[in-house]
Each structure stands twice: as structure tokens, then as C-alpha cells.
Image (spheres, grey):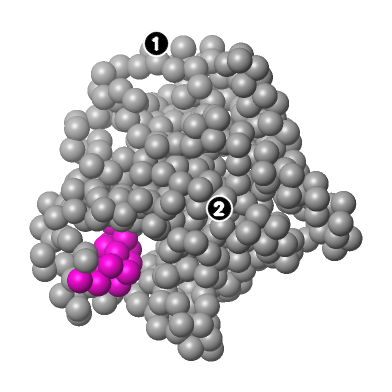
Amino acid sequence: MQHHMNQLYEERVNYICNIPRFTRKAKLDNTRLLLEELGNPQLNYKSIHVAGTNGKGSVSKMMAGVLEKSGYKTGLFISPHLVRINERISVNHIDISDEDFLEADKKVMAAVTKLLDENEAFEHPAFFEYVFALGALYFFEQGCDFVVFETGLGGRFDATNVLIPEICIITSIGLDHMQYLGNTIKEIAGEKAGIIKTGIPVVYNTGDKEADEVIESVSEKVDTVCYTVECLKEKGFTEDIEDSVFDAVAGYEKENAKTALLASRILLKEKFDPDKYSSVIKEFSFPGRLEYIKRNIILDGAHNEDAVKALIISVNEICKRDGFKNVSLFFAVSSDKDYNSIIKLLVDGLDIEDVYVSELSSSRKEDAGTVMELFQKYLPAQKHFDVVESKNMKRLWEIATGELESDTLLLVVGSLYMVGEIKGFL
């Protein structure tokens, strides 16, 4: 029986993961039809909607932690997954079980089949849309009080934008996924601001003046209140939180912790408990984000310029604090990323010892040889022999960890998918 279930689970995950990632055009009506067929499960709990280029996963996770500690049964919907698809859907910190995944999948698939049969306007949902419907249903069946939903891509046309949330949160805005979202900060901010709705408060911390202006003008247009993280001080919202709380999280997570603080206060009002918030932040960790797997090995999924800039600041802080003399890189990247500028930033910003270049097992991989040449282009000539490349990631990992000196920090960077692959063979 168990074997049969495992096999079925593998088959279904395989089916779902092979649904095209992006359909021809993003149509929210498609998602709406599917959710209606499922009985609109997403309207049976309070939701929190989080968009942004970087930081949205962390803020979502922090929010879910605060709500759970405050006594609410809390769902969390995030992406991507590192090792298993179940990581995307969790309740009170526990990932959906394979059994529950199959149960919800059966219902979603039945709804999809029925709609394809009966409604000409309906198309088979894209990968993300399908997983979102599955999560939305599961959270309802689990009887969640609150669910935090992280957008997949952008905001305006994201499947999650059918939600009617209690609060919207927009984290940092930078250049990423430009082939889908636009080439300027203004355009990208416009896509993220697409989650703003009349009468639903917005908390934002974009780190960019232009992006802030877009959010403020959209909020004004649809007649809703927006709060910038600057209000924390004005409203005295940090007075009952000790400084040590923010010092507990490294580098860029400090901004995310502030965003979560403001949003939790606005959402929970007098039910907000500073001690519960503080304990969530002090215990906070996120797989694949400044994640230590050994004293001197850190995994980080930074894969766009802003994330890499923030990562460099954090890594230099860590080196100073823990006495590392230099940094070695373990690097692989998706072909659709602006890896030229990422590599230049890493070479300029860090004191680099060795570089190990591999490639992802997905179809979106970038060739290791091409990437190696870029490192050699930006590193000083005497360092050219310190760049090693191999398509065999596991073999290269053994070499990199085998040669690692105790005063060198090994940083795995370039792609969350690579972080997932490495965690798969640790």
C-alpha cells in the first residue's frame, strides 16, 4: 500500500512539475474559475499577500511565525521548493504530507478535468496556478485561521492575485525576471503594486525611491492606506523591541524583520505581542538564505543584482565577525539571469580564494565553461588557475569541500536550484 502511494505521489509530482511554467497569457479568470469549482476555499480564512523582488520569502515566513506564535493556525505558501514540492505548502511549520498532497491533488485534478470538458474559456492551469489552487484548498481543509501567500512572479497577473487579503506587503524592488515584468524599476514596481486593492492596507519597504512613488500613487488611486517602514519610528513601534532582536538576523534580513514588524502590528493591533515577535526573529532561519551547513560553508540562493549586493555586505560582516581571511565560491547559474553583472559584483565585493563552477541539472542551466571564462575575465591574472569547472556537481562539491581551509568561508551562490541540488546529496 505504502509503495503504491509513494509511486502515485512520484507520478503526480512529476505530472505537476512538467506542466509548463508560463502559459501563453496569464489570465486570472482561469484561476478564478478553478477556485470557484473548488468552492472558493481561499475565502474561508484570512490571508496576507506578499510581493517583492527580494525578501518576500523571508517576510512571509516571519509573518507566519508571528501569527502561529500568537495562537492562530497558520498556513504558509512559498516558492520555490529546494528539495520537495511539499515545502511550498505548510501549516504551523509542518509541510503538507504526501497523503494530504495526493488527496488535494485528486480534487484539483477532478476540477480541472471537469472545467476543460465543460467550459471552452478554461485552459489547463500553469504549474504555479495549479499548486496555488492545491494549497488554497488544503489550507481550508486544515481549518487555518490565517494564511500567508507569497506571490510567484510579479503581482498583477500572479495567480495569487485573486485573493482578498487582510493586508498586502511589498518588499524590496529590484531588477529580476525582466523578460516578464519590464526593464525599469518603475515598470517592475507597477507589476508588484498590482496586488494593491481598495480598502486593504499596504506595508512597503522597497529600498527604492522610484518604487515607493509608484506604490504611493497606486494606493492613492484605489483609495487605500499605505505604510512605509519609516513609520515604525514615528508610531513608536520599535520601543518595546530590544535592539538585540534585529542584531540576531544577518545583513539583509534586518530590513525584512522591520517589514514583518510593521505588518504584524497593523494586522494584529492590540493582539500584537512584542515578546512573541522577538522570539520569532531571534529563532529565524530560512533554508537557502545565508544558511550554514558547516561552520565555514554557507548556502545562499541570491540570483539577481540586488540580492547579490545585499549578500556581499552580509558575507563581509560574517568574515569580520568570525575571522575568515577569504571566501571561496561554489557557483552555478540559470541561463536567464544576468550572471555577467552578478559575477563582476562577487569578484569586486569579496576577497576571493578559489572558484568552483558547475552547472544545474535543469534545462535552464548555463554552460560551466562560459561561466568560468567570465570569472577569469574579472579576476586578476594570477588567479586564473584558481577557477575550476566541472559539469559533475557532486564530484566538484567533493573537491571543493575537500580542499577547504578552516580560515576560508565557502559560499554557495548563483541559484536557489543549485542550493536544492546540493541539499539533495548532502
What is the number of callouts on the image?
Answer: 2
Q: Which residues are magenta?
A: 257-270
Q: Which residue is mark 2?
A: 136
Q: Is residue 294 visible?
A: yes
User: Magenta segment: does it hold 111?
Assistant: no
From this view, report whether residue 149 is shown above or below residue 127.
Answer: below
SS type, badge 1 = helix
Q: Which quarter of the rendering shows the N terminus?
A: top right
Q: Are marks 2 and 1 in contact (CB under 8 Å)?
A: no
**Closer to the eye: label 2 or 1:** 2
391 or 385: nearer the eye?
391
305 or 36: nearer the eye?
36
Q: Which residue is mark 1?
A: 402
Q: Quadrant of residue 35?
A: bottom right
SS type, badge 2 = helix
**Dominant secondary structure, magenta:** helix
Three-letter code for the amino acid on which mark 1 is drawn? Gly
Sequence order check, earlier mark of 2 and 1: 2
